[in-house]
Image (cartoon, rainbow, N blue to C red):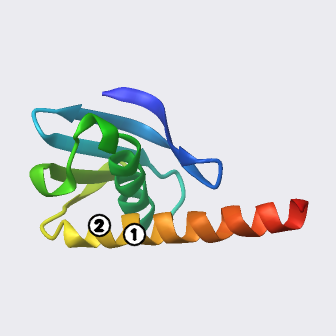
Amino acid sequence: MTSEQTLFYSPNCFGTADTIAYRQNTLRIHDLKTGTSKVSFGQLLIYAAIFFLEYEKLQVKPYETHVVLRIYQNNTFAEYVVEDMGEIVQIMSKIVMLDAIITREREEEIS
């Protein structure tokens, strides 16, 4: 696993995963939460979407990948195995769409 891995789709969409590994068509993203908030995998799903967008040119495809997300908190962990890759593909589509809108708006501000 690589720690503190930056994921970058565009200047409008990026993040840093606590740890990430991609081997043999399995993507693992792990996160450490130090608070007491209820565990939510939303952030890790977004990281997975950014990963697929970033590595699309290397032929890493969501529907050919097993995705395991894990959050460590209070000496225990919660794990989410993504069964429906459509969930991540939808997030990818939103990222692409919103990135285009933000980019267009920024360009219009400049002109």
Q: Which residue is drawn at 68% across and 61% down?
A: 103
State the image coordinates of residue 30 (x, y, percent, origin top left): 34, 45
Residue type pointed to by label 1: Ser
Q: How far apart are marks 2 and 1 (CA)?
A: 6 Å
Q: Which mark is residue 85?
A: none
Q: Where is residue 94 in the image (x, y as percent from the top left)?
A: 45, 72
Find numbered disc 2 in the image and state the secondary structure of the residue it sits on. helix
Percent x, y of residue 21: 27, 33
| Closer to us: 8 or 101 | 101
Along the line of sight, the residue nearer the viewer: 32 or 3: 3
Q: In which quarter of the image is the N terminus?
A: top left
Compared across the picture, whether 108 is left or right of 49 comes to: right
Quadrant of the image for the C terminus?
Answer: bottom right
- Estimate how packed mark 2 is, as few (under 14), some (14 to 19) or many (20 or more) residues with alpha carbons within 10 Å: some
Which three-letter amino acid code belongs to the residue tagged 2?
A: Val
User: Which residue was labeled with disc 2?
Assistant: 89
Q: Is residue 40 visible?
A: no
Q: Do the residues labelled 2 and 1 touch (CB within 8 Å)?
A: yes
**Which quadrant holds residue 24?**
top left
Task: Determine which quarter of the picture holds residue 2.
Answer: top left
Is residue 7 among what the camera can see? yes
| Front-most of residues 47 and 29 | 47
Instruction: Specify the farthest residue to the front.
Output: 111
Q: Name the residue under label 1.
A: 93
Judging from the image, what secondary structure is the residue with disc 1 in? helix
Residue 83 or 65: which is nearer the viewer? 65
Q: In this view, does 82 lie to the left or right of 19?
A: left
Residue 41 image-quadrant placement: bottom left
Is 23 on the left or on the right of 96, as rendered? left
Would you call the spot at circle 1 few (<14 residues within 10 Å), some (14-19), or many (20 or more)?
few
Horizontal side of 100 relative to 82 (left or right) equals right
